[in-house]
């Protein structure tokens, strides 16, 4: 770098440096940062508390500081967001209000009554009624058709009773009343095929379970009444 002529006819070669000072508020670059042989551009001595740092190292230090500040801000933001998410999750997972609980229980009972009612209607109309009328006996008029309808009704009733059992889980009292009937309902799964073969005992099993389901519903405030399904519902199972 070319020398600079001063008023004293002395030639100094600049030693280009920047001064980086530590203050209470952080790092600060001193304005008297260009040195000319131990003096600044105005010819004043640089204070002893200035820490002369080559410009390359100064830029590195500044880059590190900026990176640390940016990282701290990002972590702070993430931590705050995580805390907010935790609070929101805790609120969402809190105890449900009495109104919401009562509404779920009411809906559970409504669905239970609907499914159990369809099962009872199908059982009585196409299983119990023809069974008691002797339609399943050999030689009875229309026996084949009656047995086919009984098999369809048995499958439909089984599916509706299983659905009613799931509905009952939404109400503690109803769930408790239905719990002892779970195995009896499961045992109905294979009976439709027996009905199609004319097994009278299968009809009696359906009649018995339907009676117990009605009693369970009544004890829990969910009275079940027979509702005969349509042909489409019966065919759909």
Image: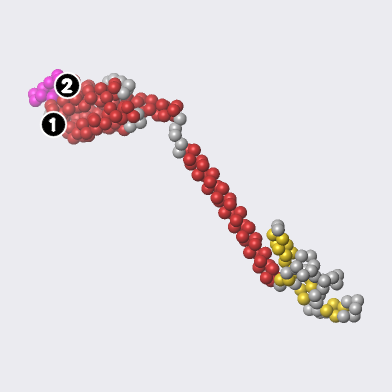
Residue at image mark 1 = 197
Side of 27 relative to 226 (left or right): right
Residue under the image location 85 percent in, 80 percent down = 11
Q: Is residue 58 above or below residue 171?
A: below
Side of 156 relative to 38 (left or right): left
Residue at image mark 2 = 130
Residue under the image location 72 percent in, 61 percent down = 23
Residues at marks 2 and 1, CA–CA distance in whole angstroms = 14 Å
Residue 142 shows in the view:
no
Classify 10 Å Cα crowding around label 1: few (below 14), some (14-19), many (20 and above): some
Side of 103 relative to 64 (left or right): left
Locate residue 114: give its quadrant.
top left
Looking at the rendered structure, the secondary structure element under dot 2 is: helix
**Circle nearer the N terminus (2, 1):** 2
User: Which span is picked out in magenta?
Assistant: 130-143
Which residue appears farthest toward the left when viewing the image?
A: 139
Which residue appears farthest toward the front when viewing the image?
A: 48
Q: Is residue 177 above or below residue 36?
A: above
Image label count = 2
> For this rendering, which residue is in front, 196 or 27?
27
Mark 2 and mark 1 residues within 8 Å of each other at the beta carbon = no
Locate residue 39: give its quadrant.
bottom right
Classify 10 Å Cα crowding around label 2: few (below 14), some (14-19), many (20 and above): some
> For this rendering, which residue is in front, 84 or 192?
84
Looking at the rendered structure, the secondary structure element under dot 1 is: loop
Residue 22 lies in magenta, yes or no?
no
């Amino acid at each position: 770098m070319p020398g600079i002529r001063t008023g004293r006819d002395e030639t100094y070669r600049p030693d280009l440096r920047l001064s980086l000072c530590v203050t209470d508020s952080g790092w600060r670059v001193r304005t008297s940062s260009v040195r000319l042989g131990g003096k600044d551009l105005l010819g004043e001595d640089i204070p002893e508390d200035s820490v002369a740092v080559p410009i390359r190292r100064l830029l590195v230090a500044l880059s590190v500081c900026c990176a640390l500040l940016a990282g701290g801000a990002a972590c702070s933001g993430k931590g705050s967001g995580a805390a907010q998410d935790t609070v929101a999750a805790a609120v969402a997972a809190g105890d449900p209000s009495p109104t919401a609980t009562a509404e779920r229980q009411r809906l559970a009972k409504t669905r239970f009554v609907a499914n159990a009612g369809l099962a009872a209607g199908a059982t009585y109309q196409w299983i119990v009624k023809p069974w008691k009328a002797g339609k399943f006996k050999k030689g009875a008029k229309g026996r084949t058709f009656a047995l086919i309808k009984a098999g369809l009704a048995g499958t439909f009733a089984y599916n509706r009773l299983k659905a009613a059992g799931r509905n009952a889980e939404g109400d503690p009292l109803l769930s408790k009343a239905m719990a002892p009937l779970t195995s009896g309902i499961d045992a109905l799964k294979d009976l439709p095929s027996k009905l199609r073969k004319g097994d009278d005992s299968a009809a009696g099993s359906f009649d018995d379970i339907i009676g117990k389901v009605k009693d369970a519903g009544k004890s829990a405030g969910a009275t079940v009444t027979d509702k005969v399904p349509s042909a489409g519902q019966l065919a759909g199972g």
